[in-house]
Image (cartoon, rainbow, N blue to C red):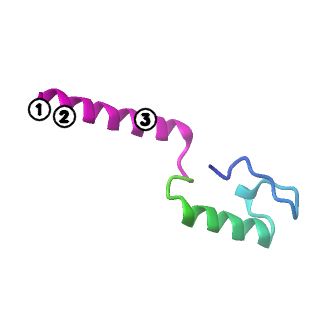
Amino acid sequence: MTYDRLVCANCAAPVSEGRCHVCRANRERLQQDNPFAGMNPMALITLLTLLIAAVALLAHQTA
């Protein structure tokens, strides 16, 4: 899950802005837990498409 849409219960601001200490702590925790959290969804889709294409090419060459 990306943190760009999460709203802080402490200050009611987006967590990605990091306005209060709770926001900043949760933003750091989410970044440490998931290395793909900072990537936008389009980059993840592109990465997944390239991975599928590479696996299909490898399967085609070995068959």
Relative height, residue 36 to residue 30 (above, below): above
Q: Are marks 3 and 2 in contact (CB under 8 Å)?
A: no
Q: Residues within 10 Å of mark 3 (few under 14, many from 20)?
A: few
- Report the predominant secondary structure element of the magenta stretch: helix
The quadrant holding residue 50 is: top left
Does the magenta segment cover residue 17? no
Looking at numbered disc 3 in the image, what kind of residue is underneath it?
Answer: Thr
Q: Earlier in the sequence, mark 3 or mark 2?
A: 3
Looking at numbered disc 1 in the image, what kind of residue is underneath it?
Answer: Thr
Residue at numbered disc 3: 46
Q: Are marks 3 and 1 in contact (CB under 8 Å)?
A: no
At horizontal 75% and vertical 51% (from top left) the residue drawn is 6
Percent position of residue 43, x then y: 48, 40
At horizontal 55% and vertical 43% (from top left) the residue drawn is 40
**Cα distance, mark 3 to mark 1?**
25 Å
Q: Which residues are magenta?
A: 38-63
